[in-house]
Image (tube, rainbow, N blue to C red):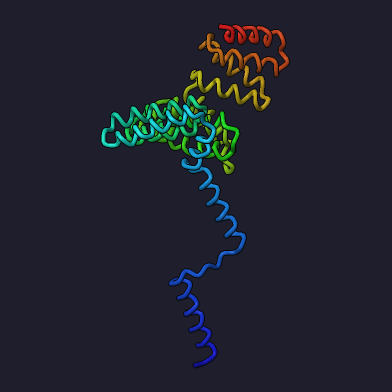
Amino acid sequence: MSKLQLIIVSLAVLLLGVLYFGFDFKTDKQTEVEQSTAKTIESTGIQTLLKEAKSSLTPEQIINTQALEQAVNDNSADQAAKIESLKQLSGSWFDYKHPAIAGHYAEEIAELLGDESSWSIAGTTYALGIKQSSEEKIKSYCMGRAVKAFENAISLNPSNIDHQLNLAICYTDIPPQDNPMKGILMLVDLSKKHPNNVGVLTNLGRLGIQTGQFEKAIGRLEKAYALEANNPQIVCLLADAYKGAGKNEEAATFTTKCKSFANN
């Protein structure tokens, strides 16, 4: 056998080994990244979150939670009873200031019912977890599930603007790294299609204040105010927008109105 033939045979044997035995030719860096990703996924699983959250509960809350968990298991064959137990469990976790876990049980209800309203409730609960949590792993956990929930709600009723608006707000709260303008562009698109939607106008105004575009914020919020003059969110945002724009007289007027809502 010639030298060239030996080389070819050796390469063929090596290739066979790679295909058959799955030799690992990953670099140390690749392995490190994969291990880190696996740890991140593990750290944000619902069982881990439950374990951490339960450690902060009072004895009475633990007893209540365990009783509701048992009720869910006991009612596994009766969907209506199981859903009722899941609602109570979700509500309890929400009262305990753990919206991520409340969202998990709301999502279980949505999986069982498969209707628009249930998916919207699950998404809204997770969205509160995004806003209220200070831990990045919990915010990330809630973000992924909120997006899934709102997308499911949209697929069931594409004409409901609220689902689209809520999804856009999620993306403004946690912009995707590969598309940081996604949420804002979704809101702008909604404003073109629905120019008199108060929710869209209000959230664009809120984002305008956050980015220092006070005049744009005022324009959108004034339009929203004309549609809903008794909406406290709009009134208080207008106070901030006028203050940011240096329009002190208007700012004072809306600040007074904002405080009146707080006192009622």
Which residue occupies the foreground of this view, 51 or 110?
51
**Is residue 78 in view from this perspective?**
yes
Provide residue 235's location: percent of width, then percent of height: 59, 12
Between residue 74 and residue 82, name the one nearer to us: 74
Q: Is residue 194 left or right of residue 134?
A: left
Q: Is residue 224 above or below residue 204?
A: above
Q: Identify the residue at horizontal 41%, vertical 31% (top origin).
A: 106
- Find residue 24 and report its horizontal and vertical position in percent: 52, 67
> Foreground: 75 or 35?
75
- Total residue callouts: 0
Residue visible at 45% across and 71% down? 21
Horizontal and vertical percent for residue 34?
55, 55
Q: Residue furthest front?
A: 59
Q: Is residue 175 left or right of residue 150?
A: right
State whether residue 92 is above or below residue 49.
above
To which quarter of the image does residue 20 belong?
bottom left
- Please indicate, yes or no, whether residue 185 appears anywhere in the rendered image: no
Residue at 41% over, 33% down = 66
For the point 53% across and 9% down, the residue is 230
> For this view, does 151 lie left or right of residue 212?
left
Farthest residue to the bottom: give it. 1
Q: Where is residue 223 drawn, in percent x and y?
A: 55, 15
Split into 4 quadrants, where in the image is the C terminus?
top right
